């Protein structure tokens, strides 16, 4: 089982800014927790972050044949990007949408995900644990 974790814009700032919303855990620390859980369940992990929408799309397209599952925190692009939604729909690799925060408990513009309808499911609101839970969700996808 090979799982591709993709992280969108500004998630590289985790742990450095807005700790009240996103906590003090850095993306590198989250990656370490994901790798620990993946080792326990013998899954292989690739973990990437970019601030560029087109790079996310290229990575999604490149996942075909290379990864079994995509775990996607598209960050703000979740709420805006038809291009990202089209890429997820087109690639045909099962995709799990994740968020650190409970987007439904925040501003109204975060309530709508353009990506959710083309994903297998969504995990949101558990902080770094959203990522760890996604490993278990991925290995149990049929
Ligand atoms: O809760 C999540 O995981 C989000 O995807 C995070 C995005 C936000 O736009 C989504 O609505 C929900 C924001 C990521 C930016 O992260 C920052 C971290 C530290 C400082 C500033 C931004």
Image (cartoon, rainbow, N blue to C red):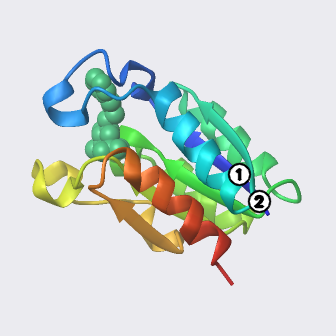
- Residue occupied by mark 2: 42
- Residue 39 numbered mark, or none: 1
Residue in front for this viewpoint, 133 or 40? 40
Q: Residue furthest bottom?
A: 142
Q: Quadrant of ligand 1?
A: top left
Q: Nearer the viewer, residue 37 or 110?
A: 37
Q: Is residue 78 above or below residue 46?
A: below
Residue ranking furthest to the right: 65
Vertical comparison of 36 with 31: above or below: below
Residue 1 location (% of width, % of height): 79, 63
- Which quarter of the figure has residue 142? bottom right
Q: Position of residue 54 (x, y in %)?
A: 62, 33
Q: Is residue 103 left or right of residue 75?
A: left
Q: For this view, does 50 lie left or right of residue 125?
A: right
**SS at circle 2:** loop
Q: Residue at x 55, y 49 (%)?
A: 83
Q: Position of residue 136 (x, y in %)?
A: 56, 67
Badge number at residue 89 = none
The reply to whether callout 1 and callout 2 are in contact (CB within 8 Å) is yes
**59, above or below 96, in the image:** above
Give the camera-side residue of 47 and 52.
Answer: 47
Q: Can residue 7 be spotted in the picture? A: no
Position of residue 110 relative to residue 97, above or below, is above
What residue appears at the point 53 percent right and 75 percent down from the top-left corner? 120
27 relative to 140 in the view: left or right:
left
Secondary structure category for the residue under label 1: helix
Q: Residues within 10 Å of mark 1 (few under 14, many from 20)?
A: few
Residue drawn at x 32%, y 58% is: 124
Q: CA distance from mark 1 to mark 2?
A: 5 Å
């Amino acid at each position: 089982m090979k799982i591709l974790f993709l992280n969108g814009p500004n998630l590289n700032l985790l742990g450095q800014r807005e700790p009240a919303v996103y906590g003090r855990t850095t993306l590198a620390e989250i990656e370490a927790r994901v790798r620990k859980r993946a080792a326990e369940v013998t899954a292989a992990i690739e973990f990437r972050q970019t601030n560029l929408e087109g790079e996310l799309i290229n990575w999604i397209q490149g996942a075909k044949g290379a990864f079994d599952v995509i775990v996607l925190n598209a960050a703000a692009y979740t709420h805006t990007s038809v291009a990202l939604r089209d890429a997820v729909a087109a690639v045909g690799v099962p995709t799990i949408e994740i968020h650190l925060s409970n987007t439904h408990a925040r501003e109204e513009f975060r309530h709508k995900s353009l990506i959710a309808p083309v994903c297998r499911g969504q995990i949101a609101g558990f902080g770094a644990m959203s990522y760890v839970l996604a490993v278990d969700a991925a290995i149990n996808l049929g």
